[in-house]
Image (cartoon, grey):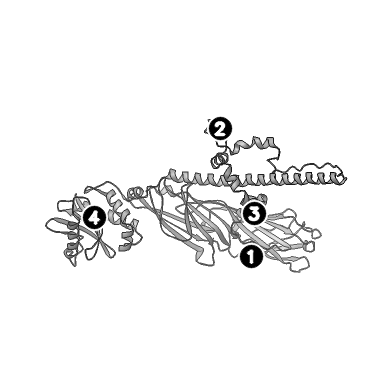
Amino acid sequence: MVVLAASICTKGGKAVVSRQFRDMSRTRIESLLASFPKLIPTGTQHTTVETADVRYVYQPLEELYILLITNKASNILQDIDTLHLFARVVSDICRSADEREILTKAFEILGAFDEIVSLGYRENVNLMQVRSVLEMESHEEKIQEIISRNKEAEAKEELKRRAKQLEMQRREQQRRAAGDTAAMYSGITGYSSVPRFEPQEHTPSRIVTSSPAPAASRAPAFKSSGMKLGSKKTKQAELLDALGGEALISSLPELSAPSTPTVSASASQHDVGRGSLPEVESQSVHVVVKEQVNLIILRDGGVQSMELKGDMILNISDESVAHIKLTLGSPSTDFGGNALQFKNHPNTNKFTATQSTKVIALKDPAKSFPLNHGIGVLKWRYAGTDESNVPLSINCWPSPSGDGTCEVSIEYELENDNVTLYDVVISIPLPDGSYPTVSSHTGEWSLDSSSHSLAWSIPIVSPADDTRSGSMVFNVGGDDAGAFFPVQVRFVGLGSMAGVNIGSVETFAGEDVPFSVDSMVTVEKYSVV
């Protein structure tokens, strides 16, 4: 086959973009394109038309035509296959096949045309290979950029730490200078201060002292040095060497304010544990319900293993309500059936999952629950393979296209009405060296370079609105359906999967007691294999 030119033109024959693969003048190609619409027969499904000199192989592209101009001796079947590849490349590059979008992406389109046809002959390439050449992305380069950003962040943290040390040193010097001035003043007036021994406080922040010898020993940390074999320098030290001491000094004014790293660290740990779960205002009787799920779902349907563990923790802060009994509420759904097992505290009344009324109270009514101390009063466990107990169903369906690409459709649906899920992240592994093109999705998505996976994030999944279910469709290189498994899921849930809740709290005299409940579900392992 010999392809003379590949063009995209309007229905009036005006060229939008055109690439000549043989020596043809602009006037010649414009003349051929102008005569093309007049040659299209009406009432026929043929996509080829011939003249005395050339053959047109064309395909409608919304309001435009994409066509190949070939010689009459060319293989028409190969020409049609090549035309289809051209059309798919244009659709992949442009969001919409209108004239403005094509003119905007003209450089990329012409580059793709050159990858498909060279000197009039078809190259042995597919869509994924053309896309890879056009993207010119390097996985190693991305990793290097991430490493560079991490080094910069570490250098900034090191600068802050050094700035705080220097600020503490400056304050220590000022304090000592003020003490020397007071001693001199007392000598002039004839009064002397009473000597007393003050042990110096050992604080971890005072690493750099005000004596000249230790300061001199720290000087090499700010001095640039060459590469040394076997050096034990950390990454932060290397970056500080490259930045120099001027960067540290220039950053002192804005970093001199004291910070509280301990408080911020604990706050961040608290945020990690609860995620986006709303806070609960504690009453004098506060009950914490914690559940942890471990689940492995089979990609073709069914459950390989499922385990749910739950704990109920009671905390009483008012002595007047220490003699109480807790009645569990009736669950809205039957979770687990007989496979759900309860275990009571040895000092409380016992009940089973089949009992209609479940009351938590001390065996000895004369005793009271401990104050200001969380005590576990109930545990429960479920283990089984009943698919109806899965809280969030995941359906991942890879469909190879036969051209080296794969279309992946994945959807989720909340199956348990007792919980509302927050910070849901569904991670789908990707084939090595391939990057996805997402065509539709709910929520947000991003690429996790550490595991080379697509992270699909849904802020909240609630049984009360349209976030109950969602889907995503993307295309990616590769034709191995098994490369997209295992799919990993993580979330934090509000409520109880087993439906364990507090119906009422009252004294033994029958008086109602105000209470608060904080219910939370976390994930130990949740995957689709």
Q: Secondary structure at mark 1?
A: loop
Q: Secondary structure at mark 4?
A: strand
Q: Secondary structure at mark 3?
A: helix
Is 45 or 108 nearer to us in this picture?
A: 108
Q: Amino acid at mark 2?
A: Ser
Mark 2 and mark 3: span between their CA atoms?
37 Å
The residue identified by callout 3 is 267
Q: Amino acid at mark 1?
A: Ser
10 Å crowding of disc 3: few (<14), some (14-19), many (20+): few
Residue drawn at the location 43% of the way across and 45% of the way down: 139
Q: Earlier in the sequence, mark 1 or mark 2?
A: 2
- Nearer the observer: mark 1 or 2; the answer is 2
Q: Is residue 247 above or below residue 358?
A: above
Q: Secondary structure at mark 2?
A: loop
The residue identified by callout 4 is 6
Is 283 or 212 nearer to us in this picture?
A: 212
Mark 1 and mark 4: span between their CA atoms?
71 Å
- Nearer the observer: mark 2 or 3; the answer is 2
Position of 351 with respect to 11 (left or right) is right
Query: Would you identify the image quadrant in which residue 286 lies?
Result: bottom right
The residue identified by callout 2 is 231
The residue identified by callout 1 is 330
Picture coordinates of residue 235 (x, y %)?
55, 40
Picture coordinates of residue 407 (x, y %)?
38, 54
Q: Earlier in the sequence, mark 3 or mark 1?
A: 3
Residue 367 visible within the image: yes
